[in-house]
Every structure is written in C-alpha cells, then in structure tokens.
Amino acid sequence: MVKFYFVRYFFLAFGLLQGLAAVLLIIQFQDSPKNRFAVFVFFSLAMILFGIHFLVFARVKRVAIGKKKIAVINSFRTKQYDWDEVKELKLMPFLNMYSLKLKGKQGKIFFLPTHNSEAIFGLFTDEPEFLPKKMSKA
C-alpha cells in the first residue's frame, strides 16, 4: 500500500519541491544572471516532473489479481474483469511494474506487483505465479 502511494505521487511531490525552490530563489536573492538561470532550471524541472506525473503515473492503479478475475481498484469503485478480457500483460523490468491492456479499453493500466521480485541486471528470472497457463505461453 505504501509502495503504491510512493510510486504514484513521487514525481508530483518532487516537482512541487522544485517549484518551491524556484519561488524561494526569486523571493530570497536579488536579480542576477546566475539566479535567473537557477530559477529557470528549477522551474523547467518542476514542469517536466508535473508532466511525467500527469501523463504516466496518473494511470497507476491498484490491481487485485486472482486465478479467474482481475479487479482494478479506483478511488471509490472496483471493476472486475475476466482473464479472457486481457489483451496484453507486460512486465517492465527496469521499473518493476506491469502494464495491462484490456480488450475494448483504450490506454494501458500500470500496476505494481504484490510480491517481491528478485532482479538480476534488470531482468526478472521467474514467471509470475498469478498468470494463467494460457497467458504465460502466449
């Protein structure tokens, strides 16, 4: 649970800190070329981090996986899907996240694995145990 919120809001919080640093530099120090450049760098970094948060990490959801169903948990509602509705399930090894694409739905859902994965040079050695046999061979 903590891992989900940390991943989901890390870029937003770090972007807010960068924006706060830019505002404090404007207020605290006098106008100089070095100060303007530092404010520009902090403000640009804050905008990039905000963009990453709203484009990518706003799609990170909590997912409960069972042998027959997948439940995507939003803030106030839970939507259940059968394994037959799953079009694609990929592991992104460097981020230790999964991307899930459902039939008839536009866009991907990103979620974190519930088990601890052992990464060896960025590659995962074991096949996830929650995948049905037909999905793991595809």
Image: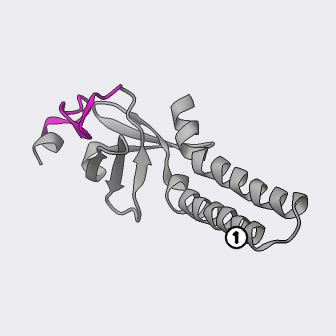
Could you tell me which quadrant the N terminus lies in? top right
Residue 72 vs residue 51, the one in the foreground: 51
Q: Is residue 123 above or below residue 50?
A: above
Q: Is residue 39 above or below residue 5?
A: below
**SS at mark 1 in the image:** helix
Say if residue 74 shows up in the picture.
no
Question: Circle 1: is it few (<14), some (14-19), or many (20+) Cα within 10 Å?
Answer: few
Q: Is residue 17 left or right of residue 70?
A: right
Q: Is residue 40 above or below residue 95?
A: below
Residue pointed to by mark 1: 37
Quarter-of-image position of residue 80: top left
Most common secondary structure along the magenta stretch: loop
Quarter-of-image position of residue 38: bottom right
Instruction: Tell me, yes or no, whether the highlighted magenta stretch contains residue 1.
Output: no
Q: Is residue 55 left or right of residue 38?
A: left
First to last magenta residue range: 116-133
Q: Residue at x 49, y 48 (%)?
A: 60
Instruction: Tell me, yes or no, whether the highlighted magenta stretch contains residue 131.
Output: yes
* Direction left: furthest residue: 137
Q: Residue at x 35, y 25 (%)?
A: 116
Q: Residue at x 42, y 38 (%)?
A: 112
Instruction: Tell me which amino acid carries mark 1.
Output: Phe
Residue 127 vs residue 31, the one in the foreground: 31
Image mark count: 1
